[in-house]
C-alpha cells in the first residue's frame, strides 16, 4: 500500500485551480497527470534579471527590470506591423515597448499613457532606439516586479504557457507535505542538503546546486534500494540447483572454438545455476562476441539437468532469427526447440503448448507470448532474456513466476554498458562480460565521408552488388525537432532514389511498417533476394546476414557512439572483408567530429561506451533509455557519476546491516521514497518473495 502521507502528491492534477478539459491534453503530453509529476517537472533554466534605475545602467541584450513612464501609443499602418508604446526612464531616455499581433490588445490595457509601470524584459536596440519586445512582465508596483528577478523557464507543450505552469507548480508546492527523512543522518549533515520539501521548493525558485543534488540523490538511492531489495529477495527465494553432466554440450559442433571470455562466462553461469538460490546474471557482449553460443550452452545445461529453458526476445524478427540460429547449432544434440510468437494460432499453437506442458519441448524461443497466462511449463528451469534493456525489472519479476520454483535468469545485452550505468540500471544482477571477439573475425574498414560524395557512394553500391554482396543503408532516427514522420520520409526518400537506380534489388524496413511487411522485407534481404536494405535504426540489433559486407550510415553525427557501433556490427559477420561508410553533414559540431574519429580508430565496444558517456554529458544515457522504469528523469549523467557510489553504499548499509524496510528508524521513510519515485517494484518483491 502507498504510504498515506503521499496521498496529496498522487492526486490528479484535475484538482488544481485553472485546469479544464482544454489543458488536460497538453499536460498529459508532458506526463503531468498528478501533483507529484508537476513537482518533479523542474525548470530547464532560469532567466536572471537585474533591477536598474535608468537605461544608461543597462547593456543591450541584458535582462532588466526598470520603472518607465508611459508617453504615447503608436499603431503601425500595416496590421502586421509592430505596435509601439513609447516610454521614458528616470533620466528621460526613451524606450519602445514593442508588440506584434494580438498582443497589442494587452499593451493598450496594461500601459495607460501618463502612468508609471515596472517593466521586466530583455533590452534590445532597433536602429538607434532602445526597445523591449513583448515585455515578460508589466507591474503597477515595484514589489510585484521585484518578485520576477529570477524566473524559472519550464518545458512546455502546445496550449500551455509559462505563467500557467508556474501557477500549477505553486499550487502543488502548497500541497507538498513534510516527508520523513530517508537519507542516512551523518551523510545528510555532511552534505548540508535541505529537507525533501525545501529541496523541491528551492529547485523551482532558482539555480540551487544543493537542492538539485539532493533530489538527484533521492532518485539514485530509491533505484539502488529497489534493486538491492530485488537481489536480497532473490537470494531468499527457492530455486532448483541445476547441474548438467555435459552429455548434450559435448555434441555441439561450433563454427569457432570458444574464446576465453565465453568459457569464463559459461563457468560463472554454471556456478550460479548449481546453487539453490536462483541465478540473476547479466551477460554483456560486444557486437559479434558470441552471446548466443553462451546462451545455448546455458540452456543445454538446464536440459541436461532435466529442466526446460525459455528464451525471450523483444521482437518477432529477433525471436525468429534466434530460433533459426539455435536450431542450426543444436541440431547434433537432438534437443527439441520450438518457436512461439503472438502470431501462432490454432493447432500449431496448441501443439507447442502441449509440448511445453508435457516436457517434450526442451527449449522455447519467442516474444512475450511465451509468458502469457495460457502458457504452462512442465519444469521451467532457466529464462534467457535477450536485449535486456527493453524489459523493465517488474517485467523480469513476472517471468520469474512461471516455474514451479523461481527459474534461473540470464539477461543479455548487446550494448556494451559503462560500469557506472551497469551499477545504476542492473544493480540487482551479477555481471559477465564478453570482451573478446571470436578468432577469424576481421576488423571492419571504417571511413568518414562528406555527404556531398553521395553520387560516388551510390555508384560504389552498384559495383558492390555486381560482386554478389549485399549492403545496408541506414537513415537517422531524429528525436528532437523532427517528428517520426520526417525520419521515415528520409528513409523513404532514400529508398525511392535507390530503387529508381537498382529496381527490386532494394527493400525498405522501418518501425512504422506493419510487422508482416517488415518481416517480408527482412526475409527477402536475409535470403539474398534483395541486395540493399534501406532502414532506420530498427536493424540496430540482432540482424545477421553474413553476405552483407557494406554499411552506409547517413548523417552519422546524429547517432550516439554506442548506436553507431551497434549498426557497424551488422557487417563483418562472414569471411569477406567488410566496410562501414559514415556519411557526415557539412556542418559538424566538435562532439560529432570526436565521435566519428573514435569510430574510425576503435572497434572496442566497451571503450566506445565509456567514451560515449563522456561525450554525451547529461544526454540520454547511451541511447538505451529503459522501458519506463530504469531511466533517470531527475539525475543528470554528471550527477549519476558523482553520487551513485554514495547512494549504493547507503542502500547497501540499510539492506544488509540495518534490516531494510523493517528498520524502525529509517524503514518507513525508505518505503516512502520508493513509492514517491515509483520504484515500488522493490517493495513488491518483498510481498512476492
Image (cartoon, rainbow, N blue to C red):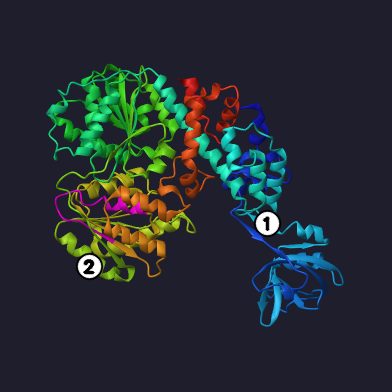
Whether residue 392 can be seen here = yes
User: Seen in the image, is 639 located left or right of residue 263?
Assistant: right
Which region shows up in magenta? Answer: 561-581
Could you classify mark 1 by the number of other residues whose Cα lies within 10 Å: few (under 14), some (14-19), or many (20 or more)?
Answer: some
- Which residue has dot 1 on it? 151
User: Whole-percent x and y of residue 172?
Assistant: 69, 42
Please give the label number shown on residue 459: 2
User: Whole-percent x and y of residue 110?
Assistant: 80, 64
- Residue 2: quadrant of the picture: top right
In the image, residue 96 above or below residue 476: below
Q: In which quarter of the image is the N terminus?
A: top right
Please give the label number shown on residue 10: none
Q: For the point 33% across and 47% down, which residue is it?
A: 517
Could you classify mark 2 by the number of other residues whose Cα lies within 10 Å: few (under 14), some (14-19), or many (20 or more)?
Answer: few
User: Whole-percent x and y of residue 460?
Assistant: 21, 65
In the image, residue 318 above or below residue 476: above
Amino acid at each position: 500500500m502507498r504510504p498515506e502521507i503521499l496521498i496529496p502528491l498522487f492526486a490528479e492534477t484535475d484538482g488544481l485551480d485553472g485546469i479544464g478539459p482544454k489543458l488536460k491534453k497538453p499536460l498529459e503530453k508532458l506526463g503531468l497527470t498528478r501533483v507529484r509529476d508537476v513537482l518533479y517537472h523542474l525548470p530547464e533554466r532560469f532567466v536572471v534579471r537585474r533591477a536598474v534605475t535608468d537605461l544608461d545602467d543597462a547593456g543591450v541584450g541584458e535582462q532588466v527590470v526598470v520603472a518607465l513612464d508611459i508617453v504615447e501609443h503608436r499603431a503601425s499602418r500595416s496590421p502586421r506591423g509592430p505596435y509601439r508604446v513609447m516610454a521614458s526612464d528616470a533620466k528621460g531616455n526613451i524606450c519602445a515597448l514593442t508588440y506584434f499581433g494580438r498582443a497589442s490588445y494587452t499593451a493598450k490595457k496594461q500601459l495607460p499613457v501618463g502612468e508609471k509601470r515596472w517593466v521586466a524584459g530583455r533590452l534590445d536596440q532597433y536602429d538607434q532606439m532602445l526597445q523591449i519586445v513583448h515585455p515578460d512582465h508589466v507591474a503597477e508596483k515595484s514589489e510585484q516586479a521585484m518578485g520576477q528577478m529570477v524566473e524559472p523557464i519550464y518545458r512546455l507543450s502546445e496550449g500551455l504557457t509559462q505563467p500557467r505552469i508556474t501557477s500549477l507548480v505553486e499550487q502543488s508546492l502548497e500541497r507538498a507535505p513534510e516527508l520523513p527523512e530517508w537519507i542516512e543522518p551523518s551523510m545528510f549533515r555532511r552534505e548540508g542538503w535541505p529537507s525533501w520539501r525545501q529541496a523541491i521548493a528551492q529547485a523551482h525558485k532558482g539555480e540551487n546546486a544543493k537542492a538539485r543534488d539532493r533530489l538527484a540523490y533521492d532518485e539514485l538511492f530509491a533505484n539502488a534500494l529497489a534493486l538491492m531489495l530485488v537481489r536480497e529477495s532473490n537470494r531468499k527465494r527457492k530455486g532448483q540447483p541445476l547441474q548438467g553432466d555435459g552429455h548434450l554440450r559435448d555434441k555441439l559442433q561450433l563454427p569457432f572454438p570458444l574464446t576465453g571470455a565465453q568459457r569464463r562466462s559459461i563457468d560463472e553461469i554454471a556456478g550460479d545455476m548449481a546453487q539453490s538460490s536462483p541465478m540473476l546474471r547479466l551477460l554483456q557482449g560486444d557486437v559479434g562476441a558470441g552471446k548466443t553460443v553462451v546462451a545455448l550452452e546455458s540452456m543445454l545445461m538446464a536440459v541436461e539437468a532435466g529442466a526446460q529453458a525459455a528464451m525471450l526476445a523483444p521482437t518477432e524478427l529477433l525471436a525468429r532469427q534466434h530460433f533459426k540460429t539455435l536450431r542450426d547449432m543444436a541440431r547434433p544434440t537432438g534437443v527439441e526447440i520450438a518457436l512461439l510468437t503472438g502470431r501462432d494460432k490454432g493447432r500449431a499453437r496448441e501443439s507447442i503448448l502441449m509440448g511445453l506442458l508435457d516436457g517434450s519441448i526442451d527449449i522455447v524461443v519467442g516474444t512475450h507470448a511465451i509468458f502469457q497466462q495460457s502458457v504452462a511449463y512442465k519444469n521451467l528451469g532457466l529464462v534467457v532474456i535477450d536485449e535486456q534493456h527493453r524489459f523493465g525489472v517488474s517485467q523480469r519479476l513476472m517471468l520469474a513466476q512461471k516455474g514451479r520454483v523461481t527459474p534461473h535468469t540470464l539477461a543479455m545485452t548487446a550494448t556494451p554498458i559503462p560500469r557506472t550505468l551497469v551499477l545504476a540500471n542492473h544493480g540487482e544482477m551479477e555481471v559477465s562480460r564478453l570482451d573478446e571477439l571470436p578468432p577469424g573475425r576481421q576488423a571492419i574498414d571504417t571511413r568518414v565521408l562528406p555527404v556531398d560524395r553521395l553520387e560516388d557512394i551510390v555508384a560504389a553500391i552498384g559495383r558492390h552488388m555486381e560482386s554478389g554482396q549485399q549492403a545496408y543503408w541506414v537513415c537517422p532516427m531524429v528525436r528532437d525537432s523532427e517528428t517520426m514522420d520526417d525520419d521515415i520520409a528520409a528513409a523513404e526518400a532514400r529508398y525511392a532514389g535507390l530503387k529508381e537506380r537498382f529496381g527490386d534489388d532494394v527493400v525498405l524496413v522501418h518501425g512504422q511498417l506493419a510487422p508482416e511487411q517488415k518481416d517480408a522485407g527482412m526475409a527477402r534481404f536475409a535470403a539474398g533476394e534483395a541486395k540493399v536494405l534501406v532502414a532506420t535504426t530498427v536493424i540496430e540489433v540482432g540482424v545477421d546476414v553474413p553476405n552483407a559486407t557494406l554499411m552506409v550510415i547517413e548523417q552519422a553525427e546524429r547517432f550516439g557512439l554506442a548506436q553507431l557501433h551497434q549498426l557497424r556490427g551488422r557487417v563483418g559477420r562472414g569471411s569477406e572483408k567488410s566496410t562501414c561508410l559514415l556519411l557526415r553533414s557539412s556542418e559538424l559540431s566538435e562532439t560529432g567530429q570526436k565521435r566519428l574519429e573514435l569510430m574510425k580508430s576503435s572497434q572496442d565496444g566497451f571503450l566506445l561506451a565509456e567514451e560515449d558517456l563522456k561525450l554525451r554529458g547529461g544526454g540520454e544515457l547511451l541511447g538505451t533509455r529503459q522501458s519506463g522504469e530504469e531511466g533517470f528523469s531527475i539525475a543528470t549523467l554528471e550527477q549519476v557519476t558523482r553520487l551513485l557510489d554514495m547512494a549504493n553504499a547507503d542502500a547497501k548499509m540499510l539492506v544488509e546491516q540495518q534490516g531494510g524496510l523493517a528498520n524502525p528508524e529509517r524503514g518507513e521513510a525508505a518505503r516512502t521514497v520508493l513509492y514517491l519515485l515509483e520504484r515500488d517494484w522493490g517493495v513488491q518483491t518483498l510481498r512476492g518473495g
